[in-house]
Image: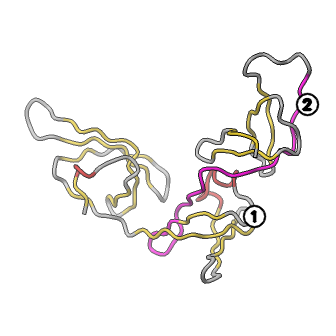
């Protein structure tokens, strides 16, 4: 059980029978009355956001979540296939559960799958992945204004803005948390 004093960003809790993650919270002590904690909770199943208020000392359950390492294998239409490297058991996940993570999945990528009631509900990617540029405009001589960038398309179809010196075929390190270019690999 967690109390309101345990709340922090990223804490996973069970609220009204569903697993949520705390995205924002604020302890508030009004002039009279008990202290309260205002929160924003994101559902780990649907992705919807709610903003309940808890009284000081309220308790919430820890969700029965299980996080396990898996390896991405391949996709067919909107179904993505993952394998447990220990037992070789395969799991199929629909693309609507994965969301934007599909832009960064490459063959044999090690990921963490989050299970609730033995059902996969979320995926956690490594912070950085290496992807190859498949399409970008060549740099034009004289276009060297400070910080100039150009669009590029990566092997997974993800579009990113890169510096002018990046060419087609270059391998880039991409941050999976925000989808931005970090450096050449």
Measured along the vertical axis of the image, is residue 172 above or below residue 63? above
- Splitting the image into 4 quarters, where does residue 85 fall? bottom right
Measured along the vertical axis of the image, is residue 45 above or below residue 29? below
Residue 14 in the image: state x and y as whole percent.
34, 61
Say left or right for 170 vs 160: right
Measured along the vertical axis of the image, is residue 25 above or below residue 139? below
Q: Which mark is residue 157?
A: none
Q: Main secondary structure of the magenta part?
A: strand
Q: Which mark is residue 138?
A: 2
Residue 135 lies in the magenta stretch? yes
Measured along the vertical axis of the image, is residue 46 above or below residue 180? below
Q: Helix, strand or loop at disc 1?
A: loop
Say left or right for 43 vs 170: left
Residue 153 in the image: state x and y as whole percent.
81, 42
Q: Helix, strand or loop at disc 2?
A: loop
Magenta region: 114-140
- Splitting the image into 4 quarters, where does residue 19 fall? bottom left
At 33% from the left and 47% from the top, the residue drawn is 8
Residue at which label 1 appears: 107
Q: How is the image coloured?
A: secondary structure
- Splitting the image into 4 quarters, where does residue 125 fall? bottom right
Q: In the displayed image of the protein, which residue is found farthest to the left?
A: 32
In this orientation, which residue lies closer to the viewer: 32 or 109? 109
Say left or right for 119 vs 145: left
- Which numbered disc, 1 or 2, marks the residue that appears first in the sequence? 1
């Amino acid at each position: 059980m967690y109390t309101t004093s345990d709340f922090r960003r990223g804490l996973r809790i069970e609220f009204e029978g569903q697993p949520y993650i705390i995205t924002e919270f604020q302890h508030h002590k009004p002039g009279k009355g008990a202290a309260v904690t205002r929160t924003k909770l994101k559902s780990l199943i649907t992705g919807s956001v709610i903003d309940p208020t808890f009284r000081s000392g309220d308790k919430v359950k820890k969700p029965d979540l299980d996080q396990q390492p898996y390896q991405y294998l391949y996709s067919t239409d909107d179904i993505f296939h993952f394998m447990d490297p220990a037992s070789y058991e395969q799991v199929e996940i629909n693309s609507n559960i994965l969301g934007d993570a599909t832009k960064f999945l490459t063959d044999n990528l090690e990921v963490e799958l989050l299970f609730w009631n033995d059902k996969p509900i979320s995926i956690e990617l490594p912070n950085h992945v290496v992807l190859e540029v498949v399409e970008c405009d060549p740099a034009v001589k004289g276009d060297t204004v400070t910080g100039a960038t150009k669009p590029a398309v990566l092997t997974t179809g993800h579009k990113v803005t890169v510096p002018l010196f990046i060419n087609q075929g270059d391998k880039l390190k991409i941050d999976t948390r925000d989808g931005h270019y970090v450096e050449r690999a």
